[in-house]
Image: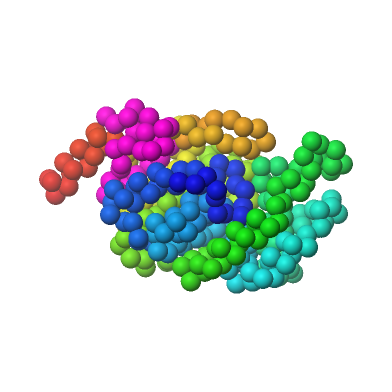
Amino acid sequence: MSTRYHTPLRYPGGKQKLTPFLVEVLDANNMIGGEYAEPYAGGAGVALELLLRKHVRKIHLNDSALPIYAFWRSVLKETDALNSMIASASMTIAEWRKRQDIVRNPKGHTLLEVGYSAFFLNRCNRSGVLSGGVIGGLDQTGNWKMDARFTRNELIRRIETIADRKSSIVVKNWDAERFMTEHVDTLPPDTLVYCDPPYFDKASRLYLNSYGPDDHERIAKFIQAKVRHKWMVSYDSAPEILWHYRKRRSFLYDLQYNASTVYKGREIFIFSDQLKVPTESELPYIDQAILENKVHLQARRNKHLAVSTSV
């Protein structure tokens, strides 16, 4: 699979590099060509890779953060206006401050202005963090300047490619639980639901909307009890998260991030009982994780089968 991604957004912990594994999950469950839903879309890296490479026929994206939703809505509904703003973008600190203010105080601005402002900060801030500092610093004396990741022509091309498939993309600005209850529940059986909630640790510095400990516990109970489609969840491997999903099959893996500095994080994939987990992967770190956790995965599978048989 090509390493050239389709999403125009930079996202901390962006999961698009995991797309081959998601394809393997779809294949193992005979869901290639089905639909795909993300209650926490963010940069939508995996969703767009799956759609544009024709592994799924339709994607359903949701983000409770208005600026992120406004950007995706602008991509689909005001493509030309958004691309015109990108083409004529002013790369100055004054413009950066203006866009920062709009994202912080979106009321009174159009969704196009809010969406473009979120995009501007995402491309000009360190690691794409909307609440973070500008690349190169306010005095623009760093080795890299604020336009280092603002490759206009390439970004416009990505947006046009996505807009060409707008009939296959649904975007919502709902709370994740509402999205899963009112929208995902209406989707066909061959829909995979992939939940990538805000990290448990250090989330407040990475996302506009983050969860507290009680929120993580609540959403874990909700997903396990209420989501009827086949689902998978990814998280940072905080002990609390491991506990919340202790009854589900899971495995830990290493993923490299780039948020201010490059580092490796330990993450977890969790799977619904009815989802078949691939026995191997083309991604070496996922393949190793599956191998290391094979006994644990199989034990959970056997327990589930035993309960199903007794019923």
Query: Is 143 within the magenta?
Result: no
Q: Residue furthest top?
A: 292
**Residue 96 x, y percent position in the rendering:** 80, 53
> Does residue 20 sit above or below 94 in this rendering?
above
Query: Is 284 within the magenta?
Result: yes
**Residue 138 x, y percent position in the rendering:** 84, 43
Looking at the picture, tell me which residue is in the foreground, 306 or 54: 54
**Residue 285 x, y percent position in the rendering:** 43, 32
Looking at the picture, tell me which residue is in the foreground, 311 or 236: 236
Residue shown at 63% from the left, 43% from the top: 206
- Can residue 250 be seen from the camera position used here? no
Residue shown at 31% from the left, 56% from the top: 31
Residue 155 lies in what quarter of the image? bottom right
Residue 251 lies in what quarter of the image? top left
**Residue 27 x, y percent position in the rendering:** 31, 50
Residue shown at 46% from the left, 62% from the top: 60
Residue shown at 54% from the left, 30% from the top: 264
Task: Give the side of residue 258 with respect to residue 145, left or right.
Answer: left
- Can residue 190 be seen from the camera position used here? yes
Looking at the picture, tell me which residue is in the foreground, 289 or 23: 23
Task: Give the side of residue 70 with respect to residue 283, left or right.
Answer: right
Coloring applied to the structure: rainbow
Question: How many numbered marks does the figure carry?
Answer: 0
Q: Residue furthest left?
A: 310
Q: Which residues are magenta?
A: 268-296
> Does residue 109 sit above or below 264 in this rendering?
below
